Amino acid sequence: MPRGGARVLVVGATGEIGTLAVRALDRRHCRTALAGRDRRRLADLAAGTGSPARGMDAYDLQGCSGLAAWAAAALGGLDGVLVTVGVAAFGPAARVSDAAAEHLLTVNALCPMAVLRGAAPVVGDGGFLAAVTGAVVDAPLTGTADYAASKAALACWLGVLARELRRRRVAVVDARFPHLDTGFGARAVEGSPPPLPRPGDPAAAVSALLDRLLAPAAPATPLWRPGPAEQTC
Ligand SMILES: NC(=O)c1ccc[n+]([C@@H]2O[C@H](COP(=O)([O-])OP(=O)(O)OC[C@H]3O[C@@H](n4cnc5c(N)ncnc54)[C@H](OP(=O)(O)O)[C@@H]3O)[C@@H](O)[C@H]2O)c1
């Protein structure tokens, strides 16, 4: 993968972490293709970075799996994909609605899986396929059962994909961010978050993740957690 000028698709580009990633990639002289749901914020971000952009919705799984081919055509090839799409819902497991549970699994698991499934044959050898899961996979709090289960499903899938793509030296990265100061929990479709630790700095977390994704030789482990310096909560 070319380190300077890497061609990267960011899916969920209009969210807080997605937008931070797009801007940081731009500062690192990478070329980005942007996919996001919020059309106005997507157009603003595309105008600011000069990137090609495409609308997407997590429920359009076929459209999600076609994003990498679109990005490769727009950028003349593809070196990496970062998926930051996600949504929360909270509450005791016995009380979370079936509709919210279905929504979490669609947005947090099926959508990223469809994006990366479509990207696997498109991304160049030595490139990366990454998605944000969260520390909740390792240590789910009470009141997060369905959110944690949706992220754990994605984490499990990423672990298998990593082994399947090892021969091509494609780094499949499961980014297990801690709680970050983006207001994510307040946008939950149902319920309120349980007491959480002091949130970390999202810009620092994104920067550390990009260091990892754009590193010349990707470590063998697919899991990525911030190092002690970035673990701010
Ligand atoms: N913030 C944290 O503390 C934290 C910690 C660990 C992991 N994470 C994970 O990090 C990711 C980004 O979170 P964030 O903090 O940046 O929150 P955010 O700003 O709410 O970003 C969520 C993104 O998901 C998109 N999205 C939600 N539902 C969608 C749907 N049906 N179809 C298409 N896109 C949809 C949103 O699109 P719109 O822009 O259109 O709203 C937005 O781009 C999530 O996967 C989250 O689980 C966050």
Image (cartoon, helix red, strand yellow):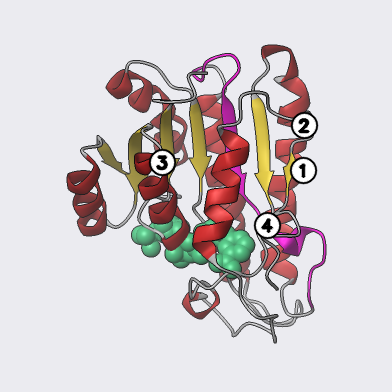
**Position of 128 compared to 46: left or right?**
right
Residue type highlighted by circle 2: Val
Q: Residue furthest front?
A: 229
Name the residue nearer the viewer: 20 or 15: 20
Q: Tag on residue 25?
A: 3
Magenta region: which residues? 122-141
Circle 2 residue: 160
Dot 1, crowdedness within 10 Å: few (<14), some or many (≥20)? Answer: few
Relative to 2, say whether 157 is above or below.
below
Dot 2, crowdedness within 10 Å: few (<14), some or many (≥20)? Answer: few
Circle 4 residue: 150
Whether residue 87 can be seen here: no
**Camera-nearest label, 2 or 3:** 3
Distance, label 3 to label 4, CA atoms, is 28 Å
Residue type highlighted by circle 1: Cys
Distance, label 2 to label 3, CA atoms, is 27 Å
CB-based contact (under 8 Å), mark 1 and mark 2: yes
